Image: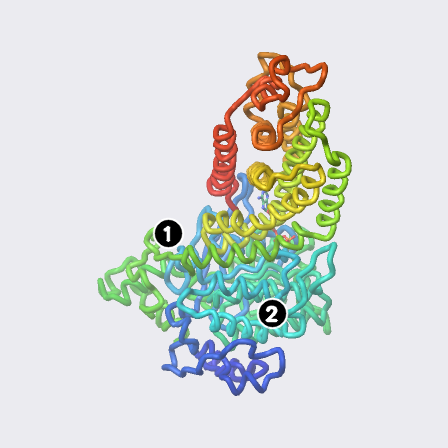
Amino acid sequence: MILGEAAAAMIISKDLFLLGDQDYLRLPNKDEKRSQGPNMGRTNTAPNHRVDSTAVHFPCLLDQRPLPVHLAFRGISVSVGGRPILEDVDGLVRPGQVLAVMGPSGCGKTTLLNSLSGRLKLDSGQIYFNRDPLCKRWKRKICYVLQQDIFFPDLTLRQTLEYQARLRLSDVMSHAQKMQYVDHIIDVLELNNCQDTIIGDYLKRGLSGGEKKRANIACELLTNPSLMLLDEPTSGLDSHAAHSLMMTLKRYAVSEGKTVVITLHQPSSQIFHLCDKLLLLCNGRTAYFGDTCKVVDFFSSVGLNIMPHYNPADFILEQIKGPQDVRQKIILAAEEARKNKDYPIELRCHDVSFITEKYDHKILPPSHGPYPSLEQDALNQMEPDVRRLWLDTHSHASSSVSSDTNDADCYFSWPTSFWTQFKVLAQRNFQEARPRMLSKLNWVQTIGLGILAGLLWFQLERREEALHDIQGWMFFSTTYWMLFALFGALSSFPPEREVINKERRSGAYRLSAYYLAKMVGELPLTITLPAIYHFISYPMLGFHSPLVFLTLLGFLLLNTVVAQSVGFFIGACCMDMQVSITMSALYTLATQLFGGYLATNIPPWLTWMRYTSMVHYAYQNMQIVEFSDGLPILCAKKSKFAICQMSDSIPVTSILEAQGTYLPLWANTLVLLGFLFVFRLLGYMVLRYFNTPK
Ligand SMILES: Nc1ncnc2c1ncn2[C@@H]1O[C@H](COP(=O)(O)OP(=O)(O)OP(=O)(O)O)[C@@H](O)[C@H]1O
C-alpha cells in the first residue's frame, strides 16, 4: 500500500513510532526514553501497550482515537460582506497526505482554511470528513495553526505546552501521561533545545521565528488531531528553516496518518515537491486541483511551458498572476479537468454521503437510488483504503448522518472538567501575570511611593488642623490604587484576549472557567502591592491601632479589587485601546471629583453623581474606621465644627456630614461589593454574548 510504503520509508527520527497504516501513536518505553539524553524522560513513562493494529498505541487516548480523515470539499463558495471570495472550489486529501493551497495574495487561501475549520459559513458547497458533514464532533479533531504566533510571552515553551496539555488532553489521562505526551511532541517538532526558553515578544528576546512557528504547531498537535490546517507556517522563515519545518510536518503526516492542508506563498521547489496535492486558487476560483507532480503537465496542456531548471512553484504563480486572458484560459482548463474521468470520484458525485450511507446500510439496493450506476461506480473507483474510511462505521459516530445534519446531532463534550480547567487556568494566570504585575518597576514604584506618602504625612497630630492631611492620605491611597488596578487590568486585557480567543475557538475550555480562574489567579497579585504600600505608609503617619490598621487595609484592598473589575469590564467591551483609555480616564476622573475630598459643595442637581463613584464609598469607609475607632480628633481653637462648642473632639458623624453625605459602614461596604459583583458579571456577559471570538 502506498501509504504504508511511504510511511516505512520516512521513519521519523528517534524511532518513536511503529509505522504502518493505522499504527499512529506510540510512546517510547522507559528504556528508549532513558537512552535519549538529558532533556528527555522528565516524567514517568507509561508501559508501551501494544494493542491491535487498528488501535492507538497510547492507552489513555483510546477514547479519542485520532481517526484518519479523508477530507473532501466540493463546490465551496463563500462571500464576505456580499463580496464573493471563493467560488466553486473543490479539493480532496487523504490521511498521510499534504494538500498545498497556493495562489497570489488575497486569492482566498485563508478564507478556505477558515471554511474548512468551520469558522466561516458557506454560501454553498459541502465539506465531508470521511462521509460526515463538518460538525462539532469533527471540529474537535481539527487543529488550525494560525498565521500569527499568539502566546503569553513570559511563559517558557515547555510551560506553554504543559498548560496546553493539561487543558486540552482528556481527564482520562493522568498528569504524568500528559507530560509524557508533551515530551513526545517536543521530540517530534525538534524543540528540545529551546524548551526552557521564554516565548518572548518584540520587547523581550525569546524563541526565534522558526522555533515560534514550531511551538505554534506543537500547541495544536497536542490535541492529537486528525486534520491539520496550517496557514502559511513557513512565512518569515529562511529557506533552510522552512524546508526543515515542512519535512517535519510531512514525516509526521505520513507516520501518524494525519491529513494536512497548508497554505503556501512562494515555496522553494524542494518544499513544493513535499506536497502530494495542490490546489491553486486564482481570484477565489480553482486554477488547478490535482497531484502536485502533474501541475506542470497541466500548464503545458494549455500552452504554458516551463523553462528548464525553473522552480515550478514560481512558474505557476507567475502564470496565474499574468494577463487576464491567460488566467481565464487556466481557469477554463481547470473546469474542463473536473469532467475528466481522472478527477476524483468523490468530487464528481452529487451527494457522496447519501450514496455511501445507502450502500453501507443497504436501506435500498443501489439500483433504486437517484444516481444508481454512480453509487456503485463511486465506491468501486475509490482506492481501497479510502473506501474503507468511507465505509468504516466506527468513524461515523452518528451513523445516520446525512448532509443536513446539524451540530446538535453531533456529540460534543469538553476535554476536561470545569474543575481541571479552573485549576490549570488559575495557575497559568498567576504564572503569566506575576512578572507583569509584580515587576521590579512596580515594586520600586510602590515602595518609593509608600515612603514618600509616609514622609509627606509623617506623624500627623490628631487635631482638627491636621484633619485635612489625614483625609488627604486616605483619598490619595484610594485613588492611586484605583487607577493602578484599573489601568493595569485594562492594558493587560487586549494581548491576553488574543490568546484566549484562539483557545476558545479551538474549544479548549469554558469561558466561565477562564473568567473565574482569572479572578482567583490574579487576586494575590492584585492585593500584594497595595498591601505593601499600606504597611509602609500607614505606620509612618503615626497611628498605631492594629485593628484600625487591618480594617483600613481591608477597605483599601476591596477598593483595588473593585477598580480592577471596572478595568476588566471596559477591557472586555472595547476592542479599541484608544477608546478604552478615554472611557477609563473619564470614569476615573469623574469618580475622583465626586469622591468627597476634592469638592464638598456639589450643586444639588449633581449630587447623585457621587453615588456612582467607587472612591466615594471606600473613602467614606476609611474615614469611618479611622475617626471612630482611632484616637479622637481634637477641636481647633477656632473650629469650623459646631459640635466643638460642646465637645473637645470631633465625632466621625460631624466630619462626614461636613462633606454632605453619610452612609453607615455596612451600606458603603455593600455598595462596593455590589460594584464588584456587577462589573465582573457584566464583563463575563460581554465576553460571552457580545465580543465572542470570530
Ligand atoms: N472580513 C473580511 N471583510 C472583507 N474582506 C475580507 C474579509 N476577510 C477576507 N477578505 C478579503 O477576502 C480576500 C481573500 O482574503 P484571504 O485572507 O483569504 O486571502 P489570502 O489568499 O489568504 O491572502 P494572503 O496570502 O495575503 O494571506 C481578500 O481580498 C480580503 O481582503
Task: Judge whether 173 appears above or below 671 on screen.
Answer: below
The amino acid marked with disc number 2 is: Asp
Query: Residue at image x 73%, y 73%?
Result: 309
Residue 321 rendering spot, x and y as whole percentages = 68, 55
Q: Nearer the viewer, residue 389 or 439?
A: 439
User: Quadrant of residue 465 in the image?
Assistant: top right
Answer with mark 2 or mark 1, whichever residue precedes in sequence: 2
Whether residue 535 appears in this view of the structure is yes
In the depicted view, which residue is nearer to us: 240 or 608?
608
At 44% from the left and 79% from the top, the residue drawn is 23
Left or right relative to 656: residue 439 = right
Quadrant holding the N terminus: bottom left
Of circles 2 and 1, the one toward us is 1
Which residue in the protein does label 2 denote?
297
Q: Out of 91 and 565, give the one closest to the viewer.
A: 565
Q: Amino acid at mark 1?
A: Asp
Which residue is located at x 66 percent, y 73 percent? 244
Q: 10 Å neighbourhood of mark 1: few (<14), some, or many (≥20)? A: some
Q: Position of residue 527 (x, y in %)?
A: 60, 46
The image quadrant of residue 391 is bottom left
Instruction: Specify the label residue 233 is tagged with.
Output: none
- Is residue 22 visible in this depiction of the protein? no
- Within 10 Å of the Cα at label 2, are there few (<14), some (14-19), or many (20+) other Cα atoms? few
Indicate if the residue with disc 1 has its beta carbon within 8 Å of ligand 1.
no
SS label for mark 2 = helix
Residue under label 1? 407
Work out whether residue 622 or residue 278 is closer to the camera in this orientation and state it: 622
Figure check: 524 above or below 383: above
